[in-house]
Image: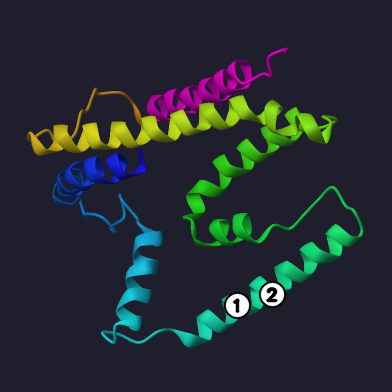
Amino acid sequence: MQIAGVFVAAFIMSPVLNLLHNNIAGGIGGRELSAPQASLFAALARGFSGEGTLPWDLIGYGALVGLVILGVDRYLRLRQSNFRAHLMPIAVGMYLPFGLATPILIGGLIAHFYSRGTPTAEHDRVLHRGVLFSSGVIAGEALISVGLACVTALGFQSMDLGLAPGLVTALSFFAAVAVVLCFVRLTRPQAL
């Protein structure tokens, strides 16, 4: 299945990425479609291939921060603390766009309150539905972005409904609250 997935993605991703890059202002890596991970890996690839210089000072700082986080996590593990400082989530959080910090925090808080008081053996089962729901929301957002790029490619630049900016902000806020409430309601753990 992995080979089939790679094969299909090879033919699907190229036109989709070209569609997004050519029909969104600034393209991939611009303000609308910031791609910090892609930019980071592209800079590393250019540096390793000799086309550019690697920022060795930043790489050194990153390695030092990583070692400190590993030390803190080891200390917490030795003290048998429930709180841990796992390196990978911290590293991913450091290079994601800052605008994602609020939804990640909200999701983390929801997961914390759901799993609080749960026995360790049941922890993954309790959080499983939330992970599935979140994955679906992320996939849906990606599909909507591709759909909007298709609409833009057809010549539609914006859809102005003539609503006041304050009303648009209020509707956006209520839609976000509705998604969070839907998340909370639909991801409650099911009894075995």
The question of residue 45 being in magenta is answered with no
Q: Identity of the amino acid at label 2?
A: Leu
Q: Identity of the amino acid at label 1?
A: Ala
Q: Position of residue 164 (x, y in %)?
A: 34, 26
- Disc 2 element: helix
Q: Nearer the viewer, residue 13 or 23?
A: 13
- Disc 1 element: helix
Indicate the colouring scheme: rainbow
The residue under the point 43% across, 30% down is: 169
The question of residue 184 being in magenta is answered with yes
Left or right of residue 77: residue 129: left
* Above or below for 80 versus 178: below
Q: Residues within 10 Å of mark 2 (few under 14, many from 20)?
A: few
Q: Position of residue 41 (x, y in %)?
A: 37, 68
Q: Quadrant of residue 3?
A: top left
The residue under the point 69% across, 57% down is: 86
Residue pointed to by mark 1: 63
Q: Mark 1 touching mark 2, by CB under 8 A?
A: yes
Question: What range is drawn magenta here?
Answer: 166-192
Q: Position of residue 116 (x, y in %)?
A: 81, 32
Can residue 116 be seen at all in this image of the molecule?
yes
Can residue 24 be seen at all in this image of the molecule?
no
Left or right of residue 23: residue 72: right
Q: Quadrant of residue 94?
A: bottom right
* Above or below for 35 versus 142: below
Question: Which quadrant holds the C terminus?
Answer: top right
Left or right of residue 123: residue 137: left
The residue under the point 56% across, 56% down is: 93
Which of the labelled discs sits on residue 131, or is there none?
Answer: none
Residue pointed to by mark 2: 67
Q: Nearer the viewer, residue 43 or 192?
A: 192
Q: Nearer the viewer, residue 44 or 170?
A: 44
